[in-house]
Image: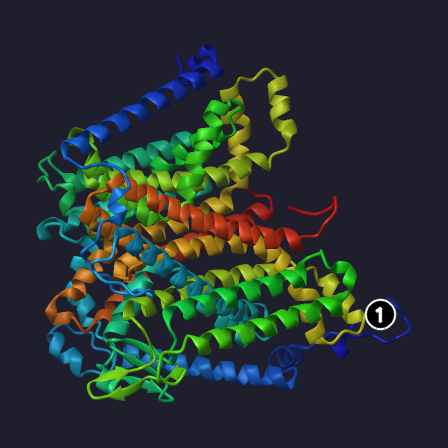
């Protein structure tokens, strides 16, 4: 770094401007270790990139005609398994002729999700209307039994649409629960705040799988059958509870980061508890808690893949089934890479959106 | 009348009291109906079943186990398996995370890009998918006769991963691990504690070194005394006939979970570590440079200690999360605590008791880990009124 040290007598002299080439040289080949790292890194890049290119494209088989035999002879990836089985992966056990319903339902929910990411739609009423309508349309399309659509029960739902349905319902049920939990935990009434604190901390210290297992497998054993809903809805309930326990802490920290004066001033104006919460505290708390909230959504979306453990036929389970049959048993890498890619697209865009919101907040446009 | 104004009229105190009464009613109803249901099925509640023999086998255990052993032993094995997987996973993930974090804070753009690609790839794909993937990879390895070997010491085969191991009895091995962990914790504590601050840095360094040395000697001594009869201390796996003999065999389930945990956890830890290094103010480093410290001294004396302070609270959360992630064992059939509990529930029907044990086990692990990490955090935090929480 000797070139930036200025030994000239004049104190206000600026360091010499580096040209683009000099900057490039300093960054990549500034010293001997740096040069070695650059060259080694480049070699690793070229090696990984070249092998991936060969595996995924140059030596890969794309056509379904040859079947599984054509793949086994090839060096590279066998994408034929995806082309042959994509319907199973996306729709699971859903009846073949009705796949369009599942696809349309999926698109509707994703569309509502994308719309609610836009700040223009951020009002409690608009969001509630959009999500209520969207989920209603989803259930009508998927379940059928009305408007001349044939009835398809929850046991036959599967694939990506099931994953997205579970995620959307968990967020939708979990969010009001989280707000209620956060407010209850802050309640001045110990009979409320202590038990709810205990519930939140216990749920947070348990792994999600154990909660899913409890609601899906154990509850039917110990609870009379008239009290039980469908397994799908019990799992959604369990996941929503888990989501709410984490989100409640995020909201609570958002509330606690507000200056105390805010609440005192609104009290002095004579606003009631609910007016204070809904008009003053919660809107500001949500704004402050936005980045960790998006993060929690990202985590929850990834965690929907855990419900494969309790035997629901979601996206990952459908993927396992896609290569599980004898014919394609060797093509597990391709199937997992494909599933990973789909998850990556969803999760990556959500987290990029979170980063965009943070930037927006930093310049004060939000 | 709107809901909000109704609530206001009734007064929030009364609402809260009503809510509390409703909760108590609901809970007692649930307990009552669960009891009824259990009685209907003829299940005797209580923890007596812990002393009954299980009658089923488990796939992986560090302690010898037979199917006639009682339930408490199988639960203990599950707990040790969870701890073993959890701590090996944490150690490996931390190693990967430090590498990724350093790569992402490096000035060299190529190294930076490599780190970024790694983090973004592994962070954005669900952990269970990665566990399935590695499990499929490890079970599709060639059979032992055609195993992939590295330096004739490490073998990858469809029966698992073979690494050199120690020929010692299980008791001695457990003692070794205990001494090792205790030694590391004590010497770390000595480095950061304020109790010996008055004695000077050299003194503390000497003490820490002495403890590490004693611990090393003790581990070697315990291992040597616990050596099995008539075999060398270190066993190296080798191909004999149709199978690989000797060495320590990691089952495919364990290897898959360990790989998935360290790569996924490493991506998250890498981000935490990067954030920690970014939180060190540039002025501090410039000041160290101005004092004439060499780059390595700047790293160990200024950047690392300051970064660790910023990292530790987040790191605790991530560690607790990773320990909880060992429950993914159930996906690939590794006998961790949760898998053992769920098998026990299926076999014995003691649902409520086993669920209580499950909750108790995880509360114990998480609170212990959390309080140890918090104690470290407290001891290295900047003291005084200006300290930031």
Residue B185 lies, with reference to residue A150, above or below; the image says below
A341 or B212: nearer the eye?
Answer: B212
Question: How many numbered tags mark residues here?
Answer: 1
Give the chain of mark 1. Answer: A
Residue of label 1 = A13
Q: How is the image coloured?
A: rainbow
Q: Report the side of A21 relative to B89 (left or right).
A: right
**Mark 1 element type:** loop
Residue B379 lies, with reference to residue A332, above or below; the image says above
The residue carrying pointer 1 sits among few (fewer than 14), some (14 to 19) or many (20 or more) residues within 10 Å by Cα, namely: few
Q: Position of residue B212 (x, y in %)?
A: 60, 71
| Residue located at (74% from left, 46% from top) | B386
B337 or B101: nearer the eye?
Answer: B337
Picture quarter containing residue A81? Answer: bottom left
Q: Is residue A235 visible?
A: no
Q: Position of residue B272 (x, y in %)?
A: 54, 59
| Residue located at (31% from left, 76% from top) | B161
Residue B247 lies, with reference to residue B203, above or below; the image says below
Q: Quadrant of the C terminus of chain A?
A: top right
Give the residue at the far right of this rendering: A9
Q: Position of residue A90 (x, y in %)?
A: 21, 56
A272 or B363: nearer the eye?
Answer: B363
Q: Is residue B178 visible?
A: yes
Residue A259 lies, with reference to residue B338, above or below; the image says above
Q: Report the side of A126 relative to A57 (left or right).
A: right
Q: Report the side of B217 relative to A82 (left or right).
A: right
| Residue located at (20% from left, 43% from top) | B349
| Residue located at (11% from left, 42% from top) | A152
């Amino acid at each position: 770094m000797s070139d930036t040290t200025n030994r000239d007598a004049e104190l206000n002299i600026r360091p010499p401007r580096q040209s683009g080439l000099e900057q490039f040289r300093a960054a990549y080949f500034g010293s001997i270790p740096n040069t070695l790292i650059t060259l080694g890194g480049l070699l690793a890049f070229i090696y990984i990139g070249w092998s991936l290119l060969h595996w995924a494209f140059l030596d890969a088989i794309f056509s379904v005609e040859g079947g599984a035999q054509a793949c086994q002879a090839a060096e590279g990836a066998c994408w034929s398994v995806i082309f042959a089985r994509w319907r199973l992966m996306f729709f699971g056990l859903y009846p073949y002729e009705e796949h369009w319903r599942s696809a349309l339902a999926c698109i509707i929910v994703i569309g509502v999700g994308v719309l609610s990411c836009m700040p223009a739609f951020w009002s409690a009423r608009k969001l509630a209307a959009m999500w209520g309508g969207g989920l209603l349309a989803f259930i009508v399309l998927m379940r059928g039994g009305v408007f001349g659509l044939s009835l398809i029960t929850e046991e036959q739902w599967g694939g990506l649409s099931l994953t997205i349905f579970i995620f959307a319902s968990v967020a939708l049920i979990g969010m009001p629960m989280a707000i209620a939990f956060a407010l209850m935990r802050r309640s001045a009434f110990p009979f409320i705040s202590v038990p709810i604190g205990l519930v939140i901390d216990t749920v947070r210290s348990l792994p999600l799988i154990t909660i899913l297992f409890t609601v899906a497998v154990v509850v039917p054993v110990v609870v009379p059958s008239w009290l039980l809903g469908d397994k799908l809805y019990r799992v959604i309930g369990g996941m929503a509870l888990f989501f709410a326990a984490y989100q409640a802490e995020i909201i609570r920290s958002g509330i606690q980061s507000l200056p105390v004066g805010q609440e005192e001033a609104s009290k002095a104006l004579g606003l009631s508890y609910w007016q204070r919460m809904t008009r003053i505290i919660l809107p500001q708390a949500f704004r402050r808690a936005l980045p960790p909230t998006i993060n929690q959504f990202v985590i929850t979306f990834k965690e929907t893949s855990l419900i494969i453990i309790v035997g629901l036929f979601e996206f990952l389970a459908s993927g396992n089934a896609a290569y599980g049959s004898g014919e394609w048993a060797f093509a597990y890498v391709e199937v997992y890479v494909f599933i990973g890619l789909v998850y990556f697209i969803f999760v990556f865009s959500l987290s990029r959106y979170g980063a965009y919101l943070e930037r927006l907040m930093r310049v004060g446009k939000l | 009348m709107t809901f909000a104004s109704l609530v206001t009229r009734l007064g929030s105190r009364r609402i809260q009291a009503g809510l509390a009464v409703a909760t108590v009613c609901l809970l007692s109803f649930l307990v009552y109906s669960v009891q009824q249901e259990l009685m209907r099925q003829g299940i005797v509640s209580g923890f007596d079943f812990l002393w009954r023999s299980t009658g089923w086998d488990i796939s992986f255990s560090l302690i010898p186990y037979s199917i006639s052993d009682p339930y408490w032993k199988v639960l203990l094995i599950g707990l040790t398996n969870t701890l073993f997987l959890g701590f090996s996973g944490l150690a490996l993930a931390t190693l990967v995370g430090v590498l990724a974090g350093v790569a992402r804070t490096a000035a060299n753009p190529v190294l930076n890009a490599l780190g970024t690609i790694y983090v973004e790839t592994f962070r954005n794909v669900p952990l269970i998918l990665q566990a399935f993937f590695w499990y499929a990879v490890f079970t599709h390895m060639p059979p032992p006769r055609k195993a992939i070997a590295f330096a004739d010491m490490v073998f990858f085969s469809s029966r698992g991963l073979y690494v050199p191991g120690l020929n010692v009895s299980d008791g001695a091995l457990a003692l070794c691990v205990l001494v090792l962990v205790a030694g590391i914790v004590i010497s770390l504590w000595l480095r950061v504690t304020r109790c010996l601050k008055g004695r000077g840095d050299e003194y503390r360094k000497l003490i820490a070194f002495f403890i590490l040395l004693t611990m090393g000697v003790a581990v070697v001594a315990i291992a040597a005394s616990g050596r099995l009869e008539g075999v060398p201390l270190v066993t190296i796996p080798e191909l004999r006939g149709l199978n690989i003999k000797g060495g320590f065999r990691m089952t495919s389930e364990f290897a898959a979970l360990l790989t998935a945990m360290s790569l996924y956890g490493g991506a998250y830890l890498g981000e935490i570590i990067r954030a920690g290094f970014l939180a060190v103010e540039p002025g501090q480093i410039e000041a160290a440079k101005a004092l004439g410290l060499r780059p390595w001294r700047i790293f160990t004396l200024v950047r690392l200690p300051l970064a660790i302070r910023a990292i530790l609270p987040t790191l605790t959360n991530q560690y607790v999360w990773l320990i909880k992630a060992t429950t993914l064992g159930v996906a690939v059939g590794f006998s961790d605590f949760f898998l053992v509990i769920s098998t026990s529930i299926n076999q014995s029907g003691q649902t409520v008791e086993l669920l209580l044990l499950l909750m108790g086990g995880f509360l114990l692990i998480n609170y212990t880990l959390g309080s140890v990490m918090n104690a470290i955090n407290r001891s290295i935090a900047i003291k005084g009124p200006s300290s930031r929480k």
